[in-house]
Amino acid sequence: MRKILFVICILLIQNDLISAQNHKKEIIEYLKKEMKEQGIPGLQVAVIKKNKVLFSESLGIANVEFAVPVTNNTKFSINSIAKIFTSVTIMQLVEQNKLQLEKPISTYLTSVPKDWGYITIKQLLSHTSGLPDIENSIGDGLISDKGQDSAWVKVQTLPLQFKSGEKFNYNATNYLLLQKVIEKIENVPFEKTVQLHQLNVAKMQHTKYANSYDVIGHKAPTYSFYTLDKTTGEQIKTNRLTELYEDFPTSFRTDAGVFTNADDMVQWTMALQNGKFLKNRDNIIKMWEPVKLNNGTYDSFGGVLNSYALGWPIMNRKTHFAASAFGGGRASVTIYPNDNLSIILFTNLTGIETYTITENISKFYFSEIN
């Protein structure tokens, strides 16, 4: 009987491996098609299923000017995906009883405008605070051209956009305040907290906070086919590929500024789900729980991303529920917790719905999962 069970186990393992390889071929073909149609120079993709890395692949060109190919060592700018490091940091503080999500920020910060003090940590994380935006409306910098300190002074003079909890409004001021709260509690720079309690724990040796102009080994530039019309504030698509210049202010690295590769994010994703960051599984569930507005509805970016949780855009649905962080219109980390599936996709072209691509990749596996 034992021999029969052993043989069955071996056959199942072999079947899984064959299936994974078949999907890899199909997925690579699909990605090559997307790269051609959308003009994506290069990308990295990784798929994790049932706590195993099915594959991690690099395609295309990292640096167009010098025709440098993408390898597994190539580092990509992942912009707003940095928010999930912030989310985990906040939940770690919750787990350590150093912070409460429902507490107003005046509990932790005394030097904020009076009408800001009633806003909760949860509302900052979920972008439902109503705070004015420290970034300008045309999306190419801060509201002050004199730097981040000047912008911080100016934003505090502006009125709230709406009553806290009434709407979803994605803006950087929320995460600037979260950085101030975290640094006040931990008494060290935010980046050091993340380094100690996430990057080191997950052994992410190729991940760091930086700007696009910093010299980092194996860093891919970020490209775009869009140009900003400063008279209208609209992004206009062209046929000309340009390289982006990105400066991520140090006072809200909670919001953006991470450079990493897919293999490092595989390590992070597995560490998160294996309880290396948060010991209590309920805290992970809470982090992914869609936040309701005051009227009981949900709001987010629209389309498949129909809700927003604590630092994570959410695909809120009965089957294949997903937490899908994306950044800069070029990078996604999508986790399907009920399906034991995670997909990481980094590209070097902004303006791409990477979460739609990861969603399409997931469909190769859903029939097996069910």
Image (cartoon, grey):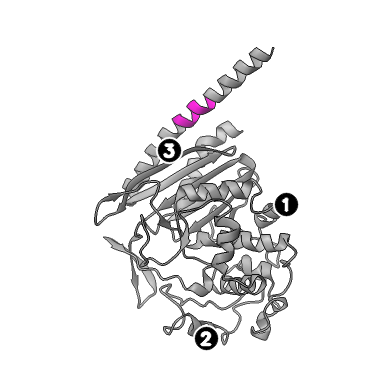
* SS class, disc 3: helix
* SS class, disc 2: helix
Left or right position of 360 against 185: left
Residue bearing mark 3: 27
**Disc 1 residue type (three-letter):** Asn
The residue most toward the left is: 66
The answer to whether residue 299 is visible is no
**Disc 3 residue type (three-letter):** Ile
At a point 60% along the width and 77% down the height, the residue shown is: 131
Comes first in the chain, label 1 or label 3: 3
**Disc 2 residue type (three-letter):** Lys
The answer to whether residue 216 is visible is yes
- The dot on residue 154 is 2
State the quadrant of the N terminus.
top right
The span picked out in magenta is: 15-22
Magenta-drawn stretch, dominant element (helix, strand or loop)? helix
Q: Nearer the viewer, residue 203 or 317?
A: 203
Total numbered badges shown on the rendered structure: 3
Q: Nearer the viewer, residue 94 or 317?
A: 94
Decide: is 288 above or below 188: above
Tell me residue 301's x, y (percent).
Answer: 54, 61
